[in-house]
Image (spheres, rainbow, N blue to C red):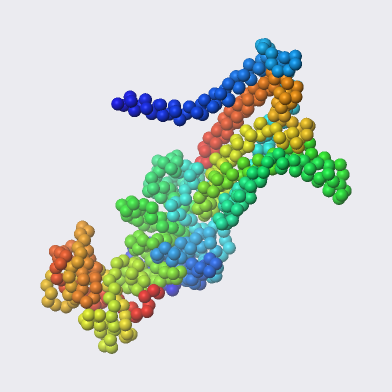
Amino acid sequence: MRADAERKRSLVTAALAAPAAIWLFLFLILPFCAMLVFAFGKRAPEGGYEAAFTLEQFANLPSRAAAFWNTLVLAPAGALLCLLVAYPVAYYLAVKAPPQRRMILVALIVVPFWTSLLVRTYAWMYILGSRGLPSLLDLIGIEDVRLLNTPGAVLLGIVYGYLPLMIMPIYVSLEKLDLRLLDASADLGARPASTFFGVTVPLSMPGVITGMALVTILLLGEYLIPQLLGGGKVFFIGNALVDLFLQSRNWPFGSAIAVTMVAVVVIVLAVSMRIAWRFAGARRVDLV
Amino acid sequence: MALANVHGTSSAKGPAIDLSNDIEFRAVTKRYGAVTAVAGIDLAVPKGAFVALLGPSGCGKTTCLRMIGGFEQPTEGIVLIENRPMNGVPPYQRPVNMVFQHYALFPHLDVLANVSYGLRQMRPAIARAEILRRSEEALELVRLGGYAKRRIHELSGGQQQRVALARAIVNRPAVLLLDEPLAALDRKLRTAMQFELQTLQRELGITFLLVTHDQEEALSMSDFVCVMHAGRVAQTGTPREVYDAPASLFVADFVGKTNHIAGVVEPGGVFRLANGAALAAGGSATGSAAAVLRPEAIRLHPDLQGEGLAGTVTHRIFLGSTVEYAVAADGLGEFLVTADRGKTDQTAAPGDRVRLSFDPAALHLFPAGTAQS
């Protein structure tokens, strides 16, 4: 009787988990294994893959160091910039905005998201291009300003494109913030800045972490923004991969880059989580 | 209506009352748009007293508390704390601390970090050892000695209440503000906390200002009660004064249970009831009036011979030491009677004919038309 119930329960669990497990196996694990195999192979003379076992591709990685560097620096930097811009907006929406206006403002933030990012990034190409802002600056005497195809342009595009993804989780966690806690903090003698960093920020950390993880992970695979606003000068791993797989058809080298990227991201995430964890732990002790 | 009179009447219980005021309201009005929450209140809370602001929800009592805390600014008038005008002074610069309704404890901090929060805000900063010592002292005071490292969500409601208390007293404020502090506790715990709050107030010697809608809480703990109604002070006085000599029909109704008797005051000190019965009435104003009578001021007699009103018992509720009766008095409607064990008859059962008697002095007369003020 009991064993029956037990078996039934594990069957239900299996049935519930199966679709996701099968999906992940077919479209994540299998392709990844294929890439691993490719990464140790050789490029066929006319492009594609030729079976082999060589570390040649990995030895060649330094030739794409710039792509790694750009991705690993600009993705977190972009996410951080997003955070700095998003937090005040989310704070205003959740804490300061009158409730009847809140939904309209949230809608205003989300609506642009429904338009193609491609189109919106294209618009930035024109704004930052030589006939856009630089020509206006030229009129007031500031000459030869180059905005397009710089890391700054890519960062701007990143903040512009990913801001809603950062605002929403922070807004959600700030909206759950009990405003009486802010009163209590002020009542106990905390100045507004102390209340903000001592109560508001710690209690909105779940939203901040979710937003940072979401935006950083998406940015690591970003292709469009560096392509349009970096113009081949500031390129990400995504651009290198497109180039290798679709242009020069060097599948083994592309695979080696992709596999290395996954490894680097896993290591970086593990280390930063360890640090964050230790930091949080230390802070708790520090609170006397 | 200032509490000035209370300085002279410092009761035997509680600490000696200083002649200066810790909190004073001078013609304080608070409006939210078209809504007037507090309508021109004068109030004085003497130093070292335990004062309760008592009233139904929406009477303005919490707004008053929040104006003292600094979370609201008066629209008109002045709020003084320790004789200093506080208009425009932010909460973090006021010498008061509050125990919030539902406690408002910081969920991301443990008990000790919650309690030490106020001390850690002090500028110039206090030494860590001192912070630790004073926080632990405050925790001992609310009997939570071993709980320093507990998380807030691991505590029961009663323990959270104590943490909130410790957190608010650790800074040694001039006045401790308590916003419905016992509302979320169950009945038994509430009674225990009433005693503890009284003890705490005596030990600390700081002024307590309690806001509550629970008349029992207000009467049992405080030295003075300020009954509020519709943004105004309806009456201030000791709990006994407010209970025994209500200033208005509203106060009589809100504080304790009452019986209403409608009638007409005739010349010569006669209060003529609807059924023709005549009672002695003090005072000189004649005309229609409403009288209130406490249920425990009425005695129940099984014999129908003698002074008083005749009636029929309709309900009987046994409450342990007392029995509550509902009696339909002939031609007058229902009376509530609280019969104390040993003092009055407790044997009458529903359907029995009884006689109700009371001391005419227990009857409080209010001229008609003053029902809601």
Which quadrant is home to the N terminus of chain B? bottom left
Q: Is residue B177 above or below residue B246?
A: above
Residue name at image x 27 percent, y 71 percent: B259
Which quadrant is home to the C terminus of chain B? bottom left
Q: Residue furthest front?
A: A46
Residue B80 placement (x, y as % from top left):
52, 66
Q: Is residue B346 above or below residue A45?
A: below
Residue B341 placement (x, y as % from top left):
18, 62
Quarter residue A153 falls in: top right
Residue B292 placement (x, y as % from top left):
29, 74
Q: Specify whether residue B345 is in view.
A: no
Residue name at image x 73 percent, y 37 percent: A154
Q: Specify whether residue B159 is in view.
A: yes
A165 sits left or right of B53 in the view:
right
Looking at the picture, tell me which residue is in the foreground, A233 or B288.
A233
Residue name at image x 73 percent, y 18 percent: A47
Residue name at image x 66 percent, y 17 percent: A38
Q: Is residue A269 above or below residue B295?
A: above
Residue A73 placement (x, y as % from top left):
70, 32
A135 sits left or right of B73 in the view:
right
Q: How many marks?
A: 0
Looking at the picture, tell me which residue is in the foreground, A201 or B175.
A201
Looking at the picture, tell me which residue is in the foreground, A258 or A13.
A13
